[in-house]
Structures are given as structure tokens and as C-alpha cells.
Amino acid sequence: MKVLILSHGSLAKGLYEACNMIVGKMDFLSYLGLDNQGLEDFNQRIKLYLNKNKNKKICFLFDLKYGTPYNQVLIQLLNYKNIQYQIITGVNLPIVLTLCMQLLCSENEDVDLKKIVNDSKNSIEISESK
């Protein structure tokens, strides 16, 4: 399975770099950010990624559901009927780390994304001073 982190700005790059720092470089993990290069450039990078990985299963990790990166990938996927994919929105570092660790330890590419998302929700908490 390939994993692609997508976001507005440099969030995807930051998550990618943090994950690589903690876990090490992983060939299945990539990122794309919608940056100052604009939408046309972003769409070209999506096409390049999809063409390179059209025979692979892909897990897309987005910052926002229905945000521009999310919408543009779904539009591009209309041209790639054979790509198997899964989507997680609201990506955070615990999701990326858990997914990557499970893929590294898994003999097959099946991971329980619902469990990964639920477990990452438990990493979000509020602490207050007394």
C-alpha cells in the first residue's frame, strides 16, 4: 500500500518529515501540499503520483474533508478507475505514525483504518492548570 499525505500549505510536508524522523524513511510514504505554485501545478503533481502508482492500493490522508486537495484528488481519480484507495480526513501525526508502523510490521497490506482513526482520537486531550 502507498500512503500519500495531502494538505493546504506545508502541513503534509511537516507530517512526512516528522514521521521520517521518528520511524525512518519509508518508500511507501509521500506527500503533496497545495502551495504558492497554484492549483494547476498541484493537479500536475497529483497526476504524476497517480500515474506512477496506478497499480497500487493507495491510502490518502487529507487535512480537510472537502478542502481543495481532497476535491482535486477525487476529480483526478475519476480518470483512474482501477486504483483502489481509502481516504482518511483530519490527518494528524498519530494517524500517520500508527499507519506507517502497521504497514512496516504487516506481511500484507491490510490495516484496520477505523481502529487507527479511533486510536488517534484518544491521543487528543485537554490539560488545564489548577
Image: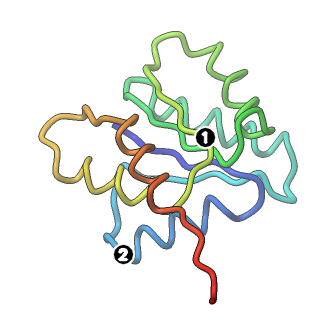
- Quick check: 26 above or below 91? below
What's the residue at 53%, 62% (across, down)?
A: 124
- Quick check: 86 above or below 120? above
For label 2, the residue is 22
Which label lies toward us, 1 or 2?
1
Kind of element beneath mark 2: helix
For label 1, the residue is 89
x and y percent of residue 33 in the render? 70, 54
Query: What's the coloring here?
Result: rainbow
x and y percent of residue 3 in the render? 44, 44
- Quick check: 68 above or below 120? above
Other residues around mark 1 within 10 Å, as few (<14) / some (14–19) / many (≥20): some
| Front residue (pair 95, 23) | 95
What's the distance in space between the residues labelled 1 and 2, CA to CA? 22 Å
| Front residue (pair 56, 64) | 64
Q: Amino acid at mark 1?
A: Thr
x and y percent of residue 75 in the render? 72, 21
Which circle's residue, 1 or 2, is located before the other in the chain?
2
Q: Is residue 34 left or right of residue 31?
A: right
Q: Amino acid at mark 2?
A: Ile
Q: Residue furthest top?
A: 81
| Front residue (pair 113, 17) | 113
